[in-house]
Structure formats: structure tokens, C-alpha cells
Amino acid sequence: MSISPLMPVYPRCGVRPVEGDNCHLIDEDGTRYLDFASGIAVNLLGHSHPRLIDAIQEQAAKLMHVSNLYGSPQGEALAQKLVDKTFADTVFFTNSGAEAVECAIKTARAYHQHEARNPERTELITFTSAFHGRTMATISASNQEKMHKGFLPLLGGFHYAEFDDLEAAKALVTDKTAGFLVEPIQGEGGIRPASQEFISGLRALCDEHDLMLVFDEVQCGVARTGKLYAYEHYGVEPDIMASAKGIGGGFPLGACLATEKAARGMGFGAHGSTYGGNPLGMAAGMAVMETVANDAFLGDVTQKGERLRSRLEQFIGNYPDLFDFVRGKGLMLGIRMKGESRPFFVHLRDNHQLLTVAAGDQTLRILPPLVADDAEFDEFFQKLSAGAESYDPAMAA
């Protein structure tokens, strides 16, 4: 056979982890890597966190799966926790971020379809450089042609405006617009926080035209920025929000949160999921929420983020030909580089056992576990410094 047993859709590298230890991954040959990628903002409690492990093991011994035809004490408890801590009144649980965004898209459209209120309002305005997932709807919601190749025709109903350009968004609003779908902080797009003016302006447009403001907080949510969700930085509440990645701490879990008003079209039979809300996932999600959804933990993330950012800003000044600037919030930080970030990301991984993530706009993503502290930060800067010293952009090109 010429094709690999694993469908070759990932450019898999030579790192082959078999074990995790707090903020490190251990390869099958014993090599230790400092993991400041966190599974792309997933392993927010690091690897082998006792509270998360205990919750999963205890629940696995009791009940892992049951149909959603039955009541869900575990799901009700986690949903109530999220409702109590956020803008939302109701929650639908999924297995992934893409599924959470799919549910959010359906919820926004269903709001206008409910009782034939505004059935012509089916279109969502999305934004350049966004990443919302890999399903047909979520790639259609992105303007990135590299994700479209091979999968045409796209699904209709999406229009793209320039990210962080309120006037561009406003110009696209028509009597067919159902709402806006936006990442308050773009992840794949290069750790780009939206401006206050932009987010507040979208909220005002939604209020004026009775549109749905849908936030994709799959990457920036769940304590990553020092707030439980990034919308809190703006003092602006969405109508619908997709959450995933960190919400399960490594267990596959996502959620679509909505206000009662926004969810009024999502009645019996409107949506479903075989595995969404399974007891095992709910146990993982509750362990994460009980750990991070408190002022002490969130304050600690904020302080760590400030320390890490300050050190990064001082560090990049030593390499003006390599690095441009630092941006982001909390422990969701990006270093914009003078050239493409991917060759440097590979150099750090392969030569200095430091795991980061390349992103758009020539950005290197720094996404440490939220439990990382000064010892891990010191190790990070040792490896980053060694990597910068030994890196030759000309060779990478």
C-alpha cells in the first residue's frame, strides 16, 4: 500500500509523544519537550493533572456513555455551572470546536426562522483570516482559500469583511443578514485581539438591527486570557458563543452557549449529537471548571501573562532582525516575526525541544499550560534564546 494507515492529512513531524508530565511531553525515545503549545490551547492544566485524571477515572468506572434520549444529571450540572459563570442561559454540548461553531451557526439562523419571524435572514458576516473549524460550514465561514481547495462548492450564506474594520462589517449588513460570527481574539490568524471599538460596534449593530452576535471562543476561551471568556475584556456580551479546546482539558469536549432569546429556535429536534454531553466528557469539563472558574486562578493567569509578556518584550529587543512585536492577552501570546514563523517554529521544536505553534501573519504562538510557572518560564527563555542564537533565516528560506 502506498497510503499510510493514518490518512495523510497532517504533515506529521518526528516528535512522537507517549507520555505527559505537567508542562512537558515525553517522546517514545525518552526525549523531553517543553510544551508551550498545549495541544493548541487544549491542555490548559498541562499533562497528567491529578484533579482531571481522578474525575475521568471515577466517571469511567461508573458510566461513560448514555443516549441523550435520557436525562443527564452530569450534563445539567456542567451546563448550570457555565450558565452561572457566563452571559448564557442555556448550553448544548458537542465533541469539538467545529461542532460548537456549527451549532452556533444553526442557532443564529434558527433565531430568525423561528415562527417565520424573519425567514429571509440567513446570512452571517464573518471576517478575514478567521479560523472556525474544518467542517463544510466552518470552512465556508472562512475566507481562507487554502481550506477551500478540493472542497468546492462551498456552502452559501457567508460574507467576509476585513477583521477589526467596523465600517467594512457595517457595509455588508442587508435585510438578509442574520448576524456576525467573530473571534474576539484571532488564534490561527496570528493572536490578533479585536479592538474595543470593533467589538462594541458589532454589538451596537446587532442591537440596532436585531441580529445575533456570535463569538467563536474555541481558542481564546476558558481562562486562557486571564478571564473565563475573552468577551469579558470588552464588557460586551454575545448572544451565542462557541467554546471548546480548554473546556475539556484534553478530553474531547465543546459547547455552544446562548441566551434564552437567541436559542428560541432550538426546540425539540432542531439539533443533536450522539456523543455530545456524554457523562465522561461532563466529568472532565466539571473538573476543569471547578479548577479555573474562580478569581484566584484567573488572577494568577493574568499575573503570569503579564510576567511572560514583559520578558518576551525585553527578549525580542535583543534580536531586532528576527522579531517584530508581542501581542495577545493572558497566556495567549504571539510574537510577530520579521519573516515567516513556521521555519523558526520547526527549528525550536527539532533542535531545542521547545514546542510552540506557527500561525498566520508571521506569528509564533506561545500557549503554555495555565499551570506553568516561573520554572517553566525560565526553561522556555533558555530554549528560546538558544534557538534565536542558532537560527539562520537565510538557511530557512
Image (cartoon, rainbow, N blue to C red):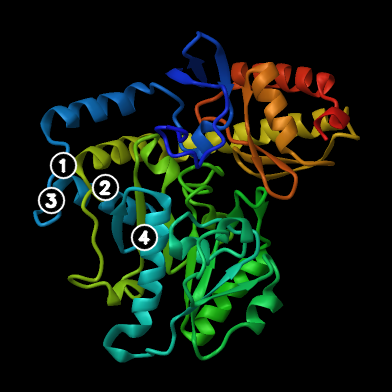
Name, please, the residue furthest toward the right: 321
Instruction: Estimate how packed mark 3 is, as few (under 14), some (14 to 19) or many (20 or more) residues with alpha carbons within 10 Å.
Output: few
CA–CA distance between discs 1 and 4?
22 Å
Instruction: Give residue 67's mark.
Output: 3
Decide which of tag 2 and tag 4 comes sooner along the chain: 2
* Whole-percent x, y for residue 196 in the image: 66, 63
> Which of pointers 2 and 1 indicates the residue nearer the eye?
1
| Residue type for callout 2 | Leu
Compared with 372, 180 (above or below) is: below
Residue beneath the point at 60% across and 59% down: 130
- Contact between marks 2 and 1 (CB within 8 A): the answer is no
> Which of pointers 3 and 2 indicates the residue nearer the eye?
3
Dot 1 falls on a residue whose secondary structure is: loop
Name, please, the residue furthest toward the front: 1
Tell me, yes or no, if residue 149 can be seen here. yes
Dot 4 falls on a residue whose secondary structure is: strand
Q: Which residue is mark 4?
A: 257
| Residue type for callout 1 | His
Q: Which residue is mark 1?
A: 65
Residue beneath the point at 73% across and 50% down: 361
Decide which of tag 4 and tag 3 comes sooner along the chain: 3
Query: What quarter of the picture does the C terminus occupy?
Result: top right
CA–CA distance between discs 4 and 3?
21 Å
| Residue type for callout 4 | Leu
Dot 2 falls on a residue whose secondary structure is: helix
